[in-house]
Amino acid sequence: MSGLAALLADHTVRTVAGGAAILGAAAGVVGSFALLRRQSLFGDVLAHAALPGLCLGFIAAGARELPALMAGAAVTGAAAALAVLALVRFTRLKADAAQGIVLSTFFAAGIVLLTFLQTRGAAGQAGLAAFLFGQAAGMLRSDLWLTGGLALAAVGLILAFWKEAKLVAFDPTYAAAAGLPVAAIEIGLTLLVAVAVLVGLQLVGVVLITALIVAPAAAARQWTDRLGPMVALAALIGAAAGLTGGVVSATARGLATGPVIVLAASAAVALSLLAAPRRGLLWQGVAARQARRRLAGERVLATLDALARAHGDPAWPAEQGMLDAAHGAPAAGALGRLRAQGLVRPVAHPPEATPHWQLTAEGSAAAGRLRDARDDRR
Amino acid sequence: MSATPAALHEPGLALHVEDLTVAYRDLPALWDIDLDLPPGVMAAIVGPNGAGKSTLVKAVLGLVRPVAGHVRLFGRPYADVRRRIAYVPQRASVDWDFPTTALDVVTMGTYARLGWFRRPGRAERSAARAALAEVGMQDYADRQIGRLSGGQQQRVFLARALVQGADLFLLDEPMAGVDAPTERIIVELLHGLRAAGRTVIVVHHDLQTVTRYFDWLVLLNRRVVAQGPVAATYTAANLRATYGGQVALIDPGEAA
């Protein structure tokens, strides 16, 4: 722990970790709405399309100046977004195909520009290639102000227009009938995704930034059924992932920040999909097993009850083989659990040496209740 | 937000539609619709699939732009009387896995009167609880909406409309895919609204129940085939004109 404290005392590490945490939190907030509006892929298009803009911004400014790079990224990102909209609107391409085409075209153009700049030696010094996978170590104090300011503004906007954003995300038709400017709010929510992408380019890189937008929201959704807690949790998970990535990559020289951040966020998703109450796979598996066991127990109880009534003896000893046959599977497990609950007991039934079972008084009562419940359902 | 409200036009009618034509791309979805609905009726809009029933509702609410014609509600354009109109969209139009509760959805009915930047408070939430109780859903207030049955979801939507305190209710297929108890609850509630002087307009799919539930009928198949009090409108000739051959099995004389 003292090692971590020493790390965080370091000026550079603090800058990087702080920037990554703020970015992660903003990505979690903005990404929650993107996820719920099924816009997850849109961030990916914007991010990949930002690469040619970064290069053009570099050419225009003649140096690695973050505002110029971001402006270039914003321009080509917007062009890509418009291209997707135009393809969907004016051709017969569906949204996923249009996004795939536009994303790869812009990214290819970006790679061509990047290699061109690198052959001239300029891009190498500017560290433009670091925008592919993110390089937090290159982050400056002034970059932090820009990054942090934009991220906080995005979160502030969502909070200010919370109920409008929620209504538009849930039920846009009703929102429009209620008089909300639905198109403007949807554009606003999409622009906020674009801001998160732009802000994240330097830290996470164009290739992986979409994961930081989707993953915290997807993880948070598993733990709660309310929007407020989901967004708050997504912000927390995003911040934790950012912090992890920032610290790890600042310590290990040359380790790209983006992949570490994304791996941390993905770990949160995996854990959530497995372990979250009610929605998690483990939880569902346990619930299904319990339901199976309860049903098996009820069936054995009902069989014993039917046999007892057929023989006019509430404590009629049934041979375990009969129960297996009626069950279509070994009844031993269910019998053991029923015995532990005091509903059945084993009895000897000479001359047969095989195991026999009979209902206890509680077992007869429980079987009667099951009968009543079944009759009610009919 | 026009400075001067539009002049009153047919103020005696709850809904007045004139020459309304809506086209998707080049295909007319609604053609030359004229409708007049007096206030206080419970009206069914009935017609075959693709007749433009939902499109008509959306055109009334200003959600689709007509290529011709106009709509007035209580004599005014929709934008001027928004608060007096409650809309219940089709249940299938939203994602029920959305992280929100029944109470929260009903509270959304108060957003319009709250306006920008104001959060719903105790008054809004208690109004929402009362609306949930009206549809018999008070015990499900805190349940995530995906864990409600279809009929319960429809009742939540209805409660969201009730909480608006509107004068006119527009419901798009509220009885589609709901169980019999829910249908009974919905119909009783709508009859209660009519008894209180409200106007209720329902896109409906079940010809068998038209005469039992409604007192006004609009038969639609891209254009208005017939409209008026159910007794006069629900005739074999009108139904045949609306549905073509599809309606051969239904004898309106018997159903009425």
Image (tube, coloured by chain):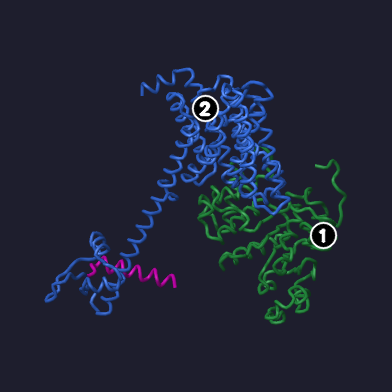
Chain colours: A blue, B green
Mark 1 lies on residue: B21
Q: Can you name the residue that lies furthest to the left here?
A: A351
Nearest the viewer among B203 and A123 is A123
Q: Is residue A199 left or right of residue A283?
A: right
Q: Tell me the number on the disc at residue A185.
A: none
**Magenta span of residues:** A358-378
Alpha carbon of mark 1 to alpha carbon of mark 2: how far? 58 Å
Whether A16 is among the magenta residues is no
Q: Is residue A200 above or below residue B64?
A: above
**Residue B255 x, y percent position in the rendering:** 68, 79
- The answer, for residue A181, to whether it is visible in the render is yes
Residue at the image point whose x is 43% and y is 49% from the top: A280
Q: How many marks?
A: 2
Residue A330 as seen in the image, left or right of residue A98: left
Quadrant location, the C terminus of chain A = bottom left
Q: Position of residue A186 (x, y in %)?
A: 67, 43
Of discs 1 and 2, which sits in the foreground?
2
Q: Secondary structure at mark 1?
A: strand
Name the subunit of mark 1: B
Task: Residue under label 2, please give it.
Answer: A135
Res A78 quadrant in image? top right
Residue sitting nearer the eye, A370 or A189: A189
Foreground of the two, B52 or A312: B52
- Does the magenta-highlighted stretch encompass residue A373? yes
Give the camera-side residue of A179 and B10: A179
Q: Are marks 1 and 2 on the same chain?
A: no
Would residue A318 appear left or right of B226 to someone viewing this image? Answer: left
Q: Chain of mark 2?
A: A
Q: Amino acid at mark 1?
A: Thr
